[in-house]
Image (tube, rainbow, N blue to C red):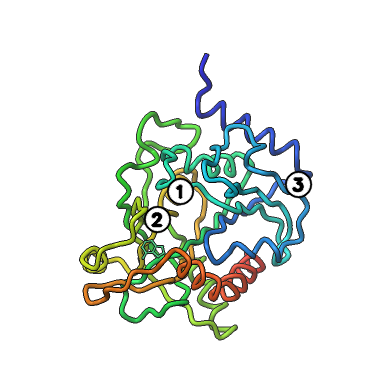
Amino acid sequence: MEKTMLDKIKETSSFIRGKVSELPDVAVILGSGLGNLADKMEVTAEIDYHDIPNFPVSTVAGHAGKLIFGTLGGKYIMAMKGRFHYYEGYDMKQVTFPVRVMKDLGVKTLFVSNAAGGMNKEFRVGDVMVITDHINLFPENPLRGKNYEELGTRFPAMTEAYKKYLVKNADEIADAEGLRLMHGVYVGTPGPTFETPAEYEYFRIIGGDAVGMSTVPEVIVANHAGMDVFGLSVITDLGGKDVDYVPTHEEVQQAAETASPVMVKLITEMLRKL
Ligand code: HPA
């Protein structure tokens, strides 16, 4: 008989349980700008994605990621170094499968990060934005299809998709540390194209402050699973109707690197505060 999603989650979760001596209740998905957060961790275990049963197989050579277990900010966490993007061809169930597994391992709080283009006129390249809400513009919702009540309710609320108490913690840390921290709504798009000037303008008009190609699927599933979510975007470029400059992928990476110390500081202190 074909394995159900529940079977797969259990299988993957028990594989991971067999590899670690302790289970975390916090997970961090490391997007651009947070890749080197892993270097700051006191690592106790690492598992390559391609060794994990049911994890999507990466099609991009040399792009394989890993799960990292260890301590940061005095807290034992698991980190996903490398995520699965919809634009790579994975379906929404594959993109969000690791979040299902995290939940089964006992994770209660999820931190996510990404690189994003800014539409908000106050933003500057290199700014860090706390995601206060999102707009889902992916062509499919990861919860479409059979709902497993064991995993969550059929029609989950998304009224506090990003927890206010976590945003408040971040603001307090930013104040204390003198960090410039913006707030905003993240627009999630399938990619892989960057936006046309008209599209950036459109996303601004509908209420977006930043746009990117990830995060929203994982956050929807985390909410379905009842996890508390906190999200950060690094603003790597600015778009709008009078901006005709399109970033290269390298420039996006570069800008994300610049903001890395602020991101790392924030996450570390957030963990200490949990
Ligand atoms: N658009 C979409 N995704 C992005 C951008 C952008 O401008 N910058 C970084 N990721």
Q: Where is residue 193 in the image (x, y as percent from the top left)?
A: 33, 56
Q: Mark 2: give few (<14), some (14-19) or many (20+) Cα within 10 Å.
A: many
The kind of secondary structure element at disc 3 is loop
Circles 2 and 1: CB atoms closer than 8 Å: yes
Quadrant of residue 103 within the rendered picture? top right
Sequence-first disc among 3 and 1: 3
Q: Which amino acid does label 1 sit on?
A: His
Badge 3: few (under 14), some or many (20 or more) residues near its Cα, within 10 Å?
some
Determine the residue positioned at 35% across, 42% down: 141
Asked if 274 appears above or below 88 in the picture, the reply is below
Q: Distance between the residues labelled 2 and 3?
A: 33 Å
Q: Quadrant location of the C terminus? A: bottom right
Residue bearing mark 3: 22
> Mark 2 or mark 1, which has the lower sequence index?
1
Mark 2: which secondary structure? loop
Q: Would you name the residue on which mark 1 appears?
A: 85
Q: Distance between the residues labelled 2 and 1?
A: 7 Å
Q: Looking at the picture, how far across and down is residue 69, in whole percent?
A: 71, 52
Which residue is identified by label 2?
Answer: 213
